[in-house]
Amino acid sequence: MSLIRFEAADTATHTQIGEGLTRVARATGRLETGHSVGKYALRHDDGCADCGRDLAAGDTFFLDTDAGDVYCEAHGAPRRDEG
């Protein structure tokens, strides 16, 4: 499992990403273009795949690049440390 750590969500549902992450976001079904947060946005409105907690603006979160799952910091950090 490959995880990408995002320091802070821009909103509760989306985070602006750079062009370098668009391929990953598209592959995981989470890419939105022309969103209000920026040209490229990562959608995370479904919350943590483990506990279901919704993310809030400013929350650290993780994206599993293989499965496309999003994890809150409490559930993503241990997975990253294991992998």
Image (cartoon, rainbow, N blue to C red):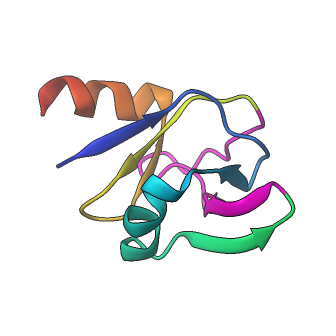
Residue 40, magenta (yes or no): yes
The residue lying toward the viewer, choosing from 65 and 19, is: 19
Instruction: Where is residue 19? Give x, y as percent.
Output: 52, 58
| Quadrant that contains the C terminus | top left
24 to the left or right of 52: left
List x then y, in percent, for residue 36.
Answer: 87, 62
Outermost residue, right side: 36
Is 16 displayed left or right of 23 in the figure?
Answer: right
Residue 13 placement (x, y as % from top left): 73, 56
Report whether 7 appears left or right of 54.
left
What residue sits 61% from the left and 44% below the top? Answer: 53
Residue for point 30% across, 42% down: 3
Instruction: Determine which quarter of the picture holds residue 43.
Output: bottom right
Residue 71 lies, with reference to residue 40, above or below; the image says above
- Number of numbered markers: 0
Q: Identify the magenta region.
A: 37-57
Residue 70 pos. (x, y %): 46, 52
Residue at 56 percent of width and 27 percent of height: 7
Q: Is residue 70 above or below residue 39?
A: above
Q: For residue 77, which quarter of the picture? A: top left
Q: Nearer the viewer, residue 12 or 51?
A: 12
Magenta highlight on residue 23: no
Report the predominant secondary structure element of the magenta stretch: loop
